[in-house]
Image (spheres, rainbow, N blue to C red):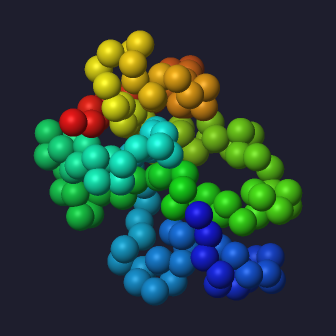
Amino acid sequence: GHASLKDDNRGESGVSLRAAIGERNAADVGRATLFISWTWRYSVKKFLEALRNYCADKKLPFSTTFAWICFFCNNQFTWLSGTQNDGVETFGDTVKQIGRVVCVVDSFRASTALYFSRLWTVFEVFIALISGVDIDFALMS
């Protein structure tokens, strides 16, 4: 996603949703401690419920636990314009800096899970494994 605020670094309109939210209220943006691996086809309600349950199970305060979610953190505007790399080069560094990947999975059966049918989510797990970061799963209900 992106918002139509001016990006001071580029001098053009279009910033990530995270940057736009931080512009309005800096307390709503913080250093991510969870990298969320997911698929865009999920129901937002079920996705948030899985994250809420994950935080409850791990005793993390949901309202102050910051997560890196591509849709909010990537400036999709610059990716689509071709003025920025595709993210693969910096992806491993982002995962290492955060230190924990939470895979939000829609089914406990790999054969029916949408999550495991997407190459990108499998790639995210692969990068987490070779980077030596912690990997957790949050099962949607």
Q: Residue at x 34, y 32 (%)?
A: 106
Quadrant containing the C terminus is top left
Numbered marks: total? 0
Image position of 126 (left or right of 105): right
Q: Residue at x 54, y 51 (%)?
A: 70
Q: Residue at x 36, y 36 (%)?
A: 104
x, y percent for residue 16 = 60, 68
Image position of 37 (left or right of 7): left
Q: Is residue 93 visible?
A: yes
Give 48 or 134, whichever is nearer the viewer.
48
Image position of 33 (left or right of 96): left
x, y percent for residue 63 = 23, 64
Q: Is residue 134 above or below residue 6?
A: above
x, y percent for residue 91 = 64, 41
- Image-quadrant location for residue 102: top left
Q: Is residue 30 above or below residue 112?
A: below
x, y percent for residue 86 = 76, 46
